[in-house]
Image (cartoon, rainbow, N blue to C red):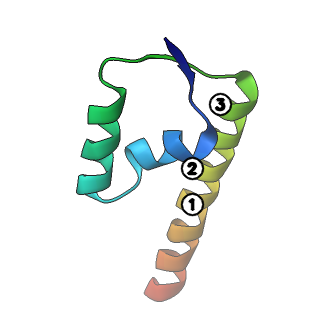
Amino acid sequence: MKVFMETSTQIQRLLHTKERMEHIQRQLKSISLCTSDYVYMEFRRVILQTFAYFSAFWVCKMV
């Protein structure tokens, strides 16, 4: 069975609590995954925005 991996699950696989990430990995272990270019684009956008926000936050804190 193929399962479509959407954006929020992709993000939670990398940026969530350890327990949540492990739970997702266990659920997906025996499943064939597929996704789309749009999901990949959204994933990159969210990740880059998050890192930009935190780096701006830390720069402001250091000044």
- Where residue 18 sits in the image (x, y, percent)? 24, 54
Circle 3: residue type: Tyr
Q: Is disc 1 placed on a helix, strand or loop?
A: helix
Structural crowding at the residue carrying mark 2, measured as other residues with C-alpha within 10 Å and reported as few (<14), some (14–19) or many (≥20): some
Could you tell which of marks 2 and 3 lies nearer the N-terminus?
3
Q: Observer-nearest residue: 26 or 55? A: 26
Q: Is disc 2 placed on a helix, strand or loop?
A: helix
Corner quadrant of residue 43 = top right
In the displayed structure image, the side of residue 24 where residue 19 appears, left or right: left
Could you tell which of marks 1 and 3 lies nearer the N-terminus?
3
**Distance (Cα) linking label 2 and label 3:** 11 Å
Residue linked to disc 3: 40
Q: Is disc 3 placed on a helix, strand or loop?
A: helix
The residue shown at (36%, 28%) is: 28
In the displayed structure image, the side of residue 58 where residue 39 appears, left or right: right
**Distance (Cα) linking label 2 and label 1:** 5 Å
- Where residue 1 sits in the image (x, y, percent)? 49, 11
Q: Observer-nearest residue: 32 or 16? A: 32
**Above or below 39: residue 2:** above
- Between circles 2 and 3, the one closer to the viewer is 3
- Residue extending furthest right? 38
- Residue extending furthest front? 1
Residue linked to disc 1: 50
Circle 2: residue type: Ile
In the displayed structure image, the side of residue 30 where residue 49 appears, left or right: right
The residue shown at (56%, 30%) is: 5
The residue shown at (70%, 41%) is: 42
The residue shown at (30%, 23%) is: 29
**Distance (Cα) linking label 1 and label 3:** 15 Å
Residue 47, label in figure: 2
Residue 63 visible, this orientation: no
